[in-house]
Image (tube, helix red, strand yellow):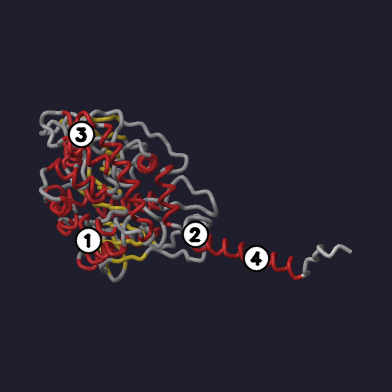
């Protein structure tokens, strides 16, 4: 017998099998942790005062008090919800047809918005228009906006969607200025057009992410801006850019990576209008600003080198202070629904004390915080595939419907029950 032949111990295959099982178990554990599969589905955490209107809204809008159920396999991950929204917006997005309006501004800029007429009669039979402000660098052609507009039209709402200045790739700038974090000029022009063109219409103000900041800032800047406004809904905004800037530089929840990706997208938008922003004689930009733009790796660097100069702010601190709705939102007196998610990778938990405190102090505010949903995700579904309509779409329209019914019938609570104010004795 050859002395060099070695026999394999019977314990060796068992050891390898054990290592394989350990590796599989480790992978499964990581997947479960990343996807938050063990995390429960719960109803949104609601903060509001106990007023007749708030009680009526929560009763008439039951989706706010029932558990939000995201897709089982991936919907409990804020990152995947955010990534899916960022990549595809919505599933099977419709293509509502509207008319594009062009509004000349006093500084030479040209604001644009798309107008979509209702596809049915509203439940109150009234003329109601949703004035919508999309997220950063977004416009009416984004899939999540299309889906929401189509759903709102079918519920009897006219929709006006602002196209952020410079966001549409096929619309050239007519002045050396584009949209910023909190400039309300274009949104104000759109609302003014709607009020003038449809003198009988009432308004529902809706803002998504950055659009939520603009919408709330617009309403709080001047009490006259709230005339004919029934309510306002803000989804996934951060409320204070100054307080948010430090969190955007942290690696917690990969926020620094998101910052880089959004900065890269902003650079592409700015460079697509390079001739207008840097070439016009009235431009406030210098050649050195263009060089700094190429080197920028964060939104803060772009804001400091480019965005703040459009309106002459002397520093990024002044820019963030003047353009954040946190300094104006307390002036809003119409019903206000503020919606955020606990797993939003873009909005740090510390910023959520702003809407929660506001809802505790002001009777007209409801703050709804979901456990899942990511940033503007809010996908719903059974296991894997999400539904075309998101939880967010349904909540906004349901809340708007309840507000419209309240304004139509002016209900009042008597002995814990809701009655029509006209005194017909019927319960709502």
Which of label 2 and label 1 is nearer to you?
2
Q: Earlier in the sequence, mark 3 or mark 1?
A: 3
Secondary structure at badge 1 equals loop
Check residue 111 in the rendering and tell me which mark sits there, or answer none: 3
Which of label 3 and label 4 is nearer to you?
4
Check residue 35 in the rendering and tell me which mark sits there, or answer none: 2
Left of 390 or right of it: where is 267?
A: left
Q: What is the quadrant of residue 284 in the picture?
A: top left
Is 154 above or below relative to 424? above
Check residue 19 in the rendering and tell me which mark sits there, or answer none: 4
Secondary structure at badge 2 equals helix
Instruction: Write the residue at 32% across / 46% down.
Output: 262
Instruction: Write the residue at 17% across / 59% down.
Output: 330
Left of 313 or right of it: where is 397?
A: right
Which of label 4 and label 2 is nearer to you?
4
Task: Give how far apart the Cα atoms at labels 3 and 1 are.
Answer: 31 Å
Is 169 above or below relative to 385? above
- The spot of residue 256 in percent (x, y) is 33, 54
Label 3: few (<14), some (14–19) or many (≥20) C-alpha neighbours in 10 Å: many
- The spot of residue 104 in percent (x, y) is 15, 30
Which image quadrant: the N terminus? bottom right
Residue 66 shows in this picture: yes
Q: What is the quadrant of residue 289 in the picture?
A: top left
Which of label 3 and label 2 is nearer to you?
2
Which image quadrant: the C terminus? bottom left
Check residue 364 in the rendering and tell me which mark sits there, or answer none: 1
Task: Give how far apart the Cα atoms at labels 2 and 1 are.
Answer: 36 Å
């Amino acid at each position: 017998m050859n002395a060099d032949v070695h026999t394999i111990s019977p314990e060796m295959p068992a050891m390898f099998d054990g290592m394989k099982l350990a590796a599989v178990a480790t992978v499964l554990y990581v997947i479960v942790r990343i996807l938050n599969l063990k995390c429960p589905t719960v109803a949104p955490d609601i903060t509001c005062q106990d007023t007749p209107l708030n009680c009526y809204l929560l009763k008439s809008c039951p989706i706010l008090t029932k558990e939000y159920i995201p897709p089982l396999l991936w919907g409990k991950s804020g990152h995947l919800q955010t990534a899916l929204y960022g990549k595809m917006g919505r599933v099977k997005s419709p293509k509502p047809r509207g008319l594009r309006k062009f509004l000349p501004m006093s500084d030479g800029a040209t604001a644009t918005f798309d107008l979509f007429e209702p596809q049915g009669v509203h439940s109150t039979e009234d003329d109601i228009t949703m004035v919508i402000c999309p997220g950063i660098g977004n416009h009416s052609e984004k899939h999540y906006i299309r889906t929401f507009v189509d759903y709102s039209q079918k519920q009897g709402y006219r929709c006006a969607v602002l196209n952020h200045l410079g966001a549409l790739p096929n619309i050239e700038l007519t002045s050396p200025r584009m949209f910023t974090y909190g400039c309300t000029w274009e949104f104000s022009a759109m609302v003014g057009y709607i009020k003038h063109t449809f003198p009988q219409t009432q308004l529902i103000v809706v803002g998504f992410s950055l659009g939520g900041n603009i919408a709330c800032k617009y309403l709080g800047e001047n009490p006259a801006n709230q005339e004919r406004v029934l309510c306002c809904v803000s989804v996934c905004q951060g409320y204070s850019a100054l307080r948010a800037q430090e969190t955007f530089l942290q690696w917690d929840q990969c926020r620094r990576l998101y910052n880089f990706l959004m900065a890269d997208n902003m650079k592409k938008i700015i460079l697509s209008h390079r001739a207008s922003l840097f070439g016009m004689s009235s431009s406030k930009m210098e050649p050195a600003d263009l060089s700094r733009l190429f080197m920028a790796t964060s939104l803060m660097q772009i804001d400091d080198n480019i965005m703040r100069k459009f309106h002459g702010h002397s520093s990024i601190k002044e820019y963030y202070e003047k353009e954040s709705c946190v300094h104006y939102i307390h002036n809003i007196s119409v019903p206000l629904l503020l919606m955020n998610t606990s797993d939003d990778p873009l909005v740090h938990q510390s910023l959520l004390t702003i809407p929660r405190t506001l809802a505790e102090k002001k009777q007209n505010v409801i703050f709804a915080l979901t456990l899942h949903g990511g940033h503007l995700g809010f996908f719903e579904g059974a296991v894997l595939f999400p539904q075309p309509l998101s939880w967010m779409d349904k909540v906004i329209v349901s809340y708007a419907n309840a507000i419209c019914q309240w304004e139509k019938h002016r209900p009042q609570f008597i002995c814990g029950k809701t009655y029509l104010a006209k005194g017909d004795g019927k319960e709502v």
